[in-house]
Image (cartoon, grey):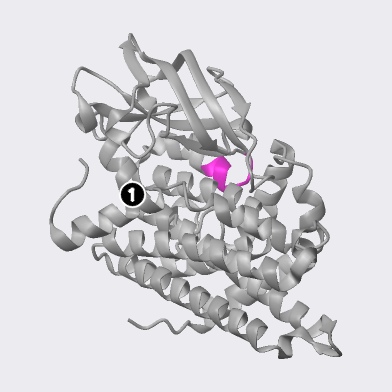
Amino acid sequence: MDFSFSEEQILMRDNVRRFLQKEVAPHVDEWDKFGPMSKETALGWLQKLEPFGYIGSLVPMEQGGHGLDRMSHGLLLEELRKVWASLGGVIGICTSVAGTLSRLGTEAQRENYLRPLLEGKMIGCSGITEPNVGSDVAGIETRAARQGNHWIINGAKTWISNGSISDFIIVTCRTGEAKGAKGLSRILVERKVSPYETREIPRIGLKAFPTAEVVFEDCQAPIENLIGKEGEGFEGAMESLEQARLNAAIGAVGIMQAAIDFSVKYAKERVQFGKPIGSFQLIQAKIAEMEALGQASRLLTYQGLWRLDKGLPCAKESSLAKFYATESAVQVTGMAIQIHGAYGLSEEYPVERLFRDARCYTIPDGTTEIHKLIIGREMLGLKAFR
């Protein structure tokens, strides 16, 4: 595996890094306190960041995207989430939805939803998790019944990223009589055509990242809004999970890098007992451990992205990266707080925000425990769950 970057990749990374450091980084702590960003704010960022390759990064150029490989996409996400993880979440979900429409959407769906998404005129989201369904996707209860030329959808989703500000949602739901995974399909519901209700969910971190409960009561969607084939919704959802897990991992890597950078800077500036605290052995030991965890997480994630780009199986590698990087981010940001001492607990310094954001990454896209079981299954050939 060769993780050296091309001149184009380095230029792309450096350009977006300069923009984010100038336009976003100085204001993040202030903006993050406002809570979930508004739809207008999110659309503004979509339009500002799209030219750097974000929303359409995984969409072919002939469909209006940038046609980047997954490693380049990962570099973009790392830079964004290093500066502001909440904004990275909003952008990441729109990028994921764009990828789904690009791969599985009809020409009409791409024209009506993918194009406006790429132009920063629409916000999309995806609905899988339910109040009674987390890791067991095959147990989804939301139902869609065919009635004439429409699907009638009833049910509830929860922890839906971008849910409260979305223009449309791709709902994984149960169609027909088949049970389990074979009975699931994905249907696009446009909010202004058939409104769905949303309620924002307060949480420990990622404060500016809209995340909601979504309720469908007799929501109508035209038959042609089926994404892919009926009964293949489970496979479609699982297909996108490897990329989602690596997106979470690279987000955790970005957060770790920010925590390391802030800690190194503080350790050089903070003076105790007449010298910078960075000269003390225990501080240096923490910095070294933080760097090791960060670099190991980055390499595991790059391995997964490399395998996806090569078209190789990636179930074990994406789970390794996701669980190791997100758990390491909690450790690294915790050590960053310790290095900052009492100031690490204060909102005056960004490390407390980084810690809260990092803690949110260990749950979505498969908990740490689920990923350990996936790794065990891939290594042993024995299933711990269906």
Identify which residue is drawn at 79% across, 43% down: 34
Magenta residues (range): 115-121
**Relative side of 21 to 12, left or right:** right
| In the image, residue 282 above or below residue 182 | below
Most extreme residue toward the front is 273
Give residue 140's quadrant in the image.
top left
Q: Quadrant of the N terminus?
A: bottom left
| In the image, residue 297 above or below residue 220 | below
**Relative side of 164 to 181, left or right:** right
For mark 1, give the secondary structure. Answer: helix
Residue under numbered circle 1:
370
Q: Quadrant of the C terminus?
A: top left
**Relative side of 43 to 274, left or right:** left
On the image, the x and y values in percent for residue 14 come to 64, 76
On the image, the x and y values in percent for residue 336 come to 66, 69
Residue type, mark 1 in image: Ile
Identify which residue is drawn at 45% across, 15% down: 220
On the image, the x and y values in percent for residue 311 come to 26, 64
User: Can you see residue 71?
Assistant: yes
Identify which residue is drawn at 37% across, 21% down: 142
Are there few (<14), some (14-19), or many (20+) residues within 10 Å of tag 1?
some
Is residue 298 or residue 71 the one in the foreground? 298
**Relative side of 361 to 241, left or right:** right
User: Can you see residue 73?
Assistant: no
The mark tally for this picture is: 1
